[in-house]
Amino acid sequence: MTTIRLTAAQALVRWLSLQQAEDGSRFIEGVWAIFGHGNVAGLGEALHAHRDALPTWRGHNEQTMAHTAIAYAKASKRRKAMAVTTSIGPGATNLVTAAALAHVNRLPVLFIPGDVFASRAPDPVLQQVEDFGDGIVSANDCFRPVVRYFDRISRPEHILTALPRALQVMTDPATCGPVCLAFCQDTQAEAFDYPVEFFQPRVWHIRRPEPDQRELEAAVATLKAAQNPLIVAGGGVIYSGAEATLRDFARTHNIPFVETQAGKGIASWEDRLNFGTPGVTGSDCGNKLAAEADVVLAVGTRLQDFTTGSWTIFKRPGRRILSVNVQPHDATKRGAQPLVADARVALEKLSAALGAHRFADPDFAARDAWFKATDAVMAAPTGNLLPSDAQVVGAVYRAATPKTLVMGAAGSMPGVLHTLWRGSEGGYHMEYGFSCMGYEIAGALGIKMALPDREVVCMVGDGSYMMANSELATAVMMGVPFTVVLTDNRGFGCINRLQKHTGGAPFNNLLDDAWHVNASRIDFVAHAGSMGAKVVKAGGIAELEAALADARGASIPTVIVIDTDPGPGTGAGGSWWEVGVPEVSTRKEVLAARKEHEAAARAQRLVN
Ligand SMILES: Cc1ncc(C[n+]2csc(CCOP(=O)(O)OP(=O)(O)O)c2C)c(N)n1
Ligand SMILES: [Mg+2]
């Protein structure tokens, strides 16, 4: 056997650089790194040596570097991913939130935090947490519940088994998610005679599981017996590459569809069978179909509470949920009838079995009425009133081109955009599995790296911007342009509205309602400018539209700051959403909200 003597870190980097996506490009496009104790000497040396084969980029915060990597994977439909390496201790635990985000959203990312010495010779080392009762626990054990594969590399030969397992998990459509390879600092630097054949280039194909025959026959029977089916299309459709298949399926059989947060953008808003969105941030026409559907054909969706209106929107007695999903956990949720398979394969087989069967026309008049109503909601305000979030979204829509891709994660924008955004195919990217504040700017960077031809518009509130913004400076350094629309309503607007809606007093959300000695005076224009971005303050909706057009073609990020009104919600659509309203309170508003809550909860269908 021919061998090559390398350190474990050198072998890991060399192996990663040779793994290919289906299109022949690197599967791991590059490595985000913040060096420190536990990775600079070992992995840092290896990354430098291989910098032409596998690029390394430096971010400003481990969590947001990981957000960039995750957004890149999502925008690449899980066909490609990135790695993130950190020091031990705080660098590693800074990644844990991002790991949870990737876990919830089923997105691949490779975490390589440094770990304590396998030898234990210098213990306790800087940043070692020390467990009194467990000798093998390190800070990296925090990753265990939020990654799909965890391993600790404490001998150089461990990577021979750990790396293929890591890539297997990241490229398996059913188990896809984050992987953590905690890499002991001394092991990184240890040499080993690796078999040369370990470093053969390898292409990682994404599997397309076929349905089980019995499940398929049962699914066909359910669909054939349906009167008013509705398709709920989720992110799994996109990860399967089944967007066109779903649109054709809907057209061939005349079945309307709605798109979840992860599924939005499967079809253009102009597709006649696209009835918008379901649930809490649903369109009126979509929720009307949901209420009437006798068969809900859920394709590639986790059926999370926003999608189902906390299980209240699928109202019809006796209705069934037929769940097409590559992951059995999702396919069998809430007593759904499962069809475990790849979305594209399943839709093709269902279509073949349905033949020329067409269902009755959905209520196209309700769809037309919805777009008419939301035109008004998105129109510019008259007079000097501060714009609402919906009016800001209207401006972005009017200034958009077919290349525009809007993105976001937390605050008011995910709801407003899900309900109102009218986009092109592939023009929407929302991190709404974890809805993590601080994903936005870092995410926009990752999307633009994956999709350089798209015009990426990042919608971020002042709260989210304040939580994490420093990768803006990274995007400036890397020359990756996108447009940030920063809506400044002076605080946590959506949570303030939720607080009031549940009977609470306005408290601790808007900056003026939070304990203070001095009124907050954040200057967002100066802040973003100080990181090197182009900055514009838009005095209103017309100026916003002009600034959006001006930003097009820039070579660095542009931040457009606009003052908005924290008061209004979306102004259209929606359904009930369950939140824990107190049973006992001294506030009569809370008791009234509790009563409403109990009445609404009676409509929940918790078992099928
Ligand atoms: C990391 C994180 N912390 C807390 C929350 C809960 N949360 C959701 S939205 C929000 C406020 C967002 O404020 P802002 O970004 O200004 O959006 P706005 O609703 O004001 O437009 C909070 C605190 C969260 N989603 N993520
Ligand atoms: Mg805000």
Image (spheres, rainbow, N blue to C red):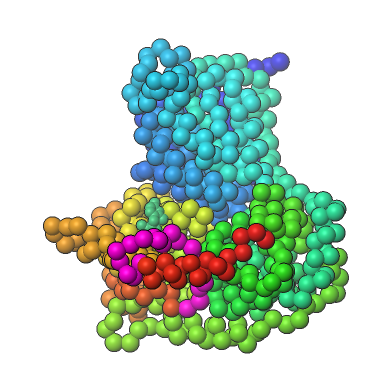
Q: Is residue 578 within the magenta segment?
A: yes
Q: In the picture provided, is 125 more to the left or to the right than 217?
A: left
Q: Does 278 appear above or below 170?
A: below
Residue 289's image quarter? bottom right
Judged left or right of residue 244, residue 425 is left
- Residue 560, how many percent across, how many down? 33, 67
Q: Name the side, left or right, on which 597 lies relative to 566.
A: right
Q: Residue at x 40, y 73 (%)?
A: 569
Residue shown at 54%/83% (left/top)? 371
Dominant secondary structure of the magenta stretch?
loop
Q: Image height check: is 382 above or below 114?
A: below
Query: Is 561 on the left or on the right of 267, as rendered?
Result: left
In the foreground, 13 or 345: 345
Give the magenta range.
Answer: 572-590
In front of the other: 358 or 304: 304
Residue 171 on image: x %, y % = 65, 43
Location of the N terminus (image quadrant):
top right
Q: Quadrant of the C terminus?
A: bottom right
